[in-house]
Amino acid sequence: MKAKNQIKSTDKHIVNLAEIVGGARSILYLKEDLVAYDCDGFTIHKHLPKAVVFPKNTQEVAEVVQYCSENNLPFLARGAGTGLSGGAIPLNGEIIISMVRMKKLISVDLENRRAVVEPGFVNLMLTNSISDKGYYYAPDPSSQYCCTIGGNVAENAGGAHCLKYGVTTNHILGLEVVMPNGEIVEVGKDGIPDAPGYDLLGLITGSEGTLGIVTKITVRILKNPEGKQTVLAYFDRVEDGSQAVSDIISAGIVPAALEMMDKTAIEGVEAAAFPVGHPKDIEAVLLIEVDGIAAGIDEQINQILEVCRKRNVREVRAAKNEEERARWWANRKTGFGAMGAISPDYLVQDGVIPRSKLPEVLSKINQISEEFGLRIANIFHAGDGNLHPLVLFDARIPGESKKALEAGSQCLKVCADVGGTITGEHGVGIEKREEMRFVFSEEEIAAQTDIREVFNPYNFLNAGKLFPSPGRCVEIKKELKAQAKIG
Amino acid sequence: MIGAESMSALKKLLNEEQIFRDEAVFNPYGNSGEVTVYPETEEEISAVLKYANSNKLTINITGGGTKRGFGGLMEKSGILLSLERYKGIVEHTPGDMTVTVKAGTPFNDIQDYLAKYNQKISLDPFWPQMATIGGIIAANESGPKRLGYGSARDAVIGLRTVYPDGKVIRSGGKVVKNVAGYDMNKLFIGSMGTLGVVSEITLKLRPLPKCESLVLVSFPQGKMEKIKVLAVNILDSMIEPVTMELLNPALANKLAGINSYTLALTFEDVESSVRYQEEFIKNILPADADLRIHSKEESESFWSEFYQHIPNTAAKELPAETEASLKIGSVNMSILNVMKEAELLIDLLNVSIESHGGLGHGLSQVTIRGAAEDVADAAAKVRQIAESTGGYAIVKHMTFEMRKEISVWGENPSYFFLLQGIKTKIDPLKTLNPKRFVGGI
């Protein structure tokens, strides 16, 4: 056979898998090729896969999965590899099933407001493909220019605009899924809502690739709002800024986005690629976007300006034009990467808190920062309480990676303790497995792994993710020490 | 069977006045129990479940009793667990816009409470004055405003669920964004009480709209093609109706005195936006359509009437006519076909039909009244119609006797083994709401 001849491996599994996906051009198995796949956006933990295969269609995915499952080979699916919690890291030397060649936009049905895509289709491409007709796809993670919708489904990705429009799960109408034994299942046929039976759609979305491999996705698309306007507000005190957030929401306004950055974060974004001239001495900046019927926008903007003034704002104003609005957002959306301008390394966390606890939580994070001697910048989806503490550190200094991990974990503990949670949109992955214990009891974790067993009974699919090791009541610190050693 | 031993065991778990036994109880809808118990705390719910589960007794669950005709092939379980005394607001933080409530709280009680803070739960279920939040979530009830605000799966952010063995499992939390672990909330929403007893529910809230209006567009000639053109134009426009519900002539007549197909558009926003959207509709109105614009008060009373139009099993006697109600899921625009075809059954089978469907969300509902046999025939036909458009139909209301003759949930889906697997994992002894759900789960 031709494909067989091209494979320079004697490993029968490599040979057989290559045959399934159509030859040597659709598989990587040499060490030098595999290193690019030893981690995703979470770079502290690394492991080489056994191979990476690139199937072109559902059938090939199903055959690869069936082969792996019959031969006891661990496997996992990977999209663009932008995940921030390590969900696509081949901890067990998995066969990585890369979905990047399944990147078609299959159909768009404007009348029924839905589109069908393959999992490797890039998030922003969907909006770009339908924007000329006035439509868009709402979930907008910061990595949307390169992350795939399949990955978004696995992680239940969020974004700046999910305050008003919801996260990925609110926009998924149907899925075709390859089960861990290779069987192909379709849930939410044709995107028709409320299919009789348990809500498998909701369960699979956000399961971090541990219940099945999604091969086709029906998503809801929305009509562009008629108008939008963004307000920028500078505060001298974080308390005032966060009170303004509550006041805006209490005034009955549902902003499309409501973002906050603290002083350290401002220092970062101003030193990076998209500075907009935020004052250096300001404690908090708020970005507030309202969208909807154009006739109603001014009234809401005036109300927002009013609220901010009542809370001792130093300066507040609406964007003069679309160009300015876009600059403000570019400055914010590249916020994580911008930390590279003021620190050699950074670790991003993803806690969620009840909005009203913000001042309390920020002051505790300050304490953690002082205690560990590490700067922590805060970028905050303030409207929905999703806090991204960015722990700044220098991995070249011995022990500092470990300290950063510990500080990050402590931040999550603070979030959990005020009634929040450990991840709002990045997922648990490898990174926050042990922190799951901050929010769930042993029994509650077992209730979740019970569900995994129904779908993935032998746990060949993406094993070792999402859940803490069973029955192990180790101190989280120990786990973190182990992680830091690997890093 | 609940023998003397079980009775005395239950009496150890609950007070005398929380246990009720009446052999001659009115029960044409099934889903009943030999003994009704009224737990007042989560510990009591847990204790009853644990006892039943370890003594091979079955439990049916009820709240306001409005959905006793929805699913179920058990006339009686051993125990009917009523949550109507487990009610009240547990926690409401206005600044966070979240509320935690006990499952037995009637929906309107919560809305009335929240209204004082200019907030609401963005669900619009039927019979909201009687239906409990627990029942609404367990049955995944939604109404026309789903178009604007989504359904239970979009509103619920946290649950406490008592498992059949008595343990309490929390899912989600109290924050609006949460991806820690599996999204277990979704598992219990719409599970018809077959996995656990949801005891506490945390929901995200929305502000009450500052302004609201109802625009009724009626089509005296009843041409579906015309209705479709308008609906497609609205969906393709920048306006943002919260409802776009088509009512059949009988329902439009009942609610608004208009005896023709009527599109009910609701706008909720700041006043300038609402007025702008009303104007927009006026400007694109087809020549042969009539338009009426109703104020906020009129809109509220219209919808409040609407939510009472389907059968309700809480009444103490059967209505004179046999009633059935079906929920249909289809692609949005197929609703027009479903409603049109269902209309033909009126003359064909001598039944009356009230139907409505959301042209922006894909769910419709057909309520049939008439002689028992005709109603059963019509219900079967409605399912055929739904399936011929590629959708599904489930029976939301029928008497116990009638349910035995029709498959309430339709054919099992191809992935039934997963549904069964989930049930077996969580409720291996089939203690909770046995035979209530898809495929006899």
Image (spheres, rainbow, N blue to C red):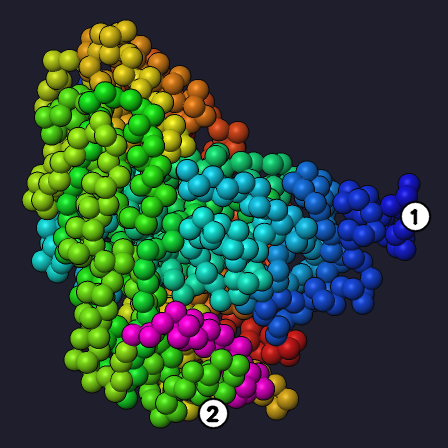
> Residue A452 in magenta?
no
In the image, what residue type sits under mark 1? Asn
> Residue A319 in magenta?
yes
Q: Which residue is mark 2?
A: A373
Q: Where's residue A470, x and y in %?
A: 53, 59
Q: Which region of the structure is painted magenta? A: A318-346
Q: Which residue is mark 1?
A: A5
User: Eyeballing the image, is B438 above or below B134?
Assistant: above
**Identity of the residue drawn at 71% across and 47% down:** A55
Q: Residues within 10 Å of mark 2 (few under 14, many from 20)?
A: some
Q: Where's residue B342, x and y in %?
A: 30, 17
Which element carries disc 2, helix, strand or loop? loop
Asked where in the image residue A354 lies, by quadrant, the reply is bottom left
**Identity of the residue drawn at 33% across and 87% down:** A283
Q: Chain of mark 2?
A: A
Name the main secondary structure of what is drawn in magenta.
Answer: helix
Q: Where's residue B45, x and y in %?
A: 25, 45
**Identity of the residue drawn at 11% across and 29% down:** B256
Q: In this image, B405 relative to B64: left or right?
A: right
In this view, the residue in front, B65 or B247, is B247
